[in-house]
């Protein structure tokens, strides 16, 4: 039987695997080897692009999953009509395409910058803010685009997720059966845990004033949502399901 919830969960799982695979292998190689910790310019840009594309995709997939839960709980009789196979496919493909295009914009803006040394990235991988610090030109345009993208891809989806779950919390007490209420709370709580972990750490990294968060703290935060969060997602959803 086709289930939109598990359709999007499978997309989230694939995205998490791809997200971690884009930077973790090189990160582990650098931690093991103390001699060869170099990465050339093109692979570094590719790492930045993939890391941004998968991060943006995760934001949008989490938004789509909250909409799916909203329709399932608040409009159960229309659920199969609203969240049909075609709609779910369009939502999934659109999320991936938009995320790839937005990540491409960031990479194109990096390519216009001159890099004249030092060429040492103070990070575990080619994170975009750390790469920009190596540029020997004004990066104000890059910073503005990063902040605007963060508002659009982080604050916007998070606001819509909170609206969806506010409506869900209002609707849950109206469910007649106790089992139905427990099932609704269970599926929604697991999703809210993932949303809180991912969006919280990302917003602090890219939108909070940098003076309040030292560079080492920024590295730990980015490591959290790029490595630990993809590892925690399967655990959270497995226990809840």
Image (spheres, rainbow, N blue to C red):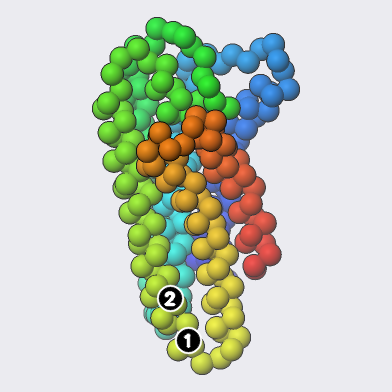
Q: Residue at x 39, y 57 (%)?
A: 158
Quarter of the picture holding the N terminus = bottom right
Q: Residue 240: percent from the left, percent from the top?
A: 64, 67
Q: Alpha-carbon neighbours of circle 1 within 10 Å: few (<14), some, or many (≥20)? A: few
Q: Alpha-carbon neighbours of circle 2 within 10 Å: few (<14), some, or many (≥20)? A: many
Q: Which mark is residue 24?
A: none
Q: Is residue 6 left or right of residue 207?
A: right
Q: Is residue 49 left or right of residue 216?
A: left
Front residue of 31/101: it is 31
Q: Which mark is residue 173?
A: 1
Q: Residue at x 55, y 68 (%)?
A: 189
Q: Residue 179: percent from the left, percent from the top?
A: 61, 86
Is 93 rendered above or below residue 100? below
Q: Residue at x 58, y 51 (%)?
A: 13
Query: SS for tag 2?
Result: helix
Residue corresponding to mark 2: 168
Label 2 and label 1: CA atoms lie apart by 9 Å
Quarter of the picture holding the C terminus = bottom right
For marks 2 and 1, the one nearer the N-term is 2
Is 170 rendered above or below residue 69? below
Q: Residue at x 46, y 62 (%)?
A: 65
Q: Residue 71: percent from the left, percent from the top?
A: 41, 73
């Amino acid at each position: 039987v086709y289930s939109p919830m598990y359709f999007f969960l499978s997309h989230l799982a694939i995205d998490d695997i791809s997200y971690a695979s884009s930077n973790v292998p090189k990160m582990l190689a650098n931690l093991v080897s103390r001699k060869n910790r170099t990465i050339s310019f093109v692979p570094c840009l590719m790492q930045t692009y993939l890391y941004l594309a998968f991060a943006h995709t995760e934001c949008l997939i989490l938004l789509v999953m909250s909409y799916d839960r909203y329709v399932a709980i608040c409009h159960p009789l229309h659920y199969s009509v609203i969240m049909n196979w075609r709609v779910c496919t369009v939502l999934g493909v659109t999320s991936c395409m938009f995320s790839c295009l937005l990540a491409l914009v960031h990479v194109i803006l990096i390519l216009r910058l001159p890099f004249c040394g030092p060429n040492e990235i103070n990070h575990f991988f080619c994170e975009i803010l750390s790469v920009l610090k190596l540029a020997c030109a004004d990066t104000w345009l890059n910073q503005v685009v990063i902040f605007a993208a963060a508002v659009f891809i982080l604050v916007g989806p998070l606001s819509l997720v909170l609206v969806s779950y506010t409506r869900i919390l209002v609707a849950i007490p109206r469910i007649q059966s106790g089992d139905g209420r427990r099932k609704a709370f269970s599926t929604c709580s697991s999703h809210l845990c993932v949303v809180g972990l991912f969006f919280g750490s990302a917003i602090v990294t890219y939108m909070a004033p940098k003076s309040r968060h030292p560079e080492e703290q920024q590295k730990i935060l980015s490591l959290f949502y790029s490595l630990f969060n993809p590892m925690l997602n399967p655990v959270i959803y497995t226990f809840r399901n």
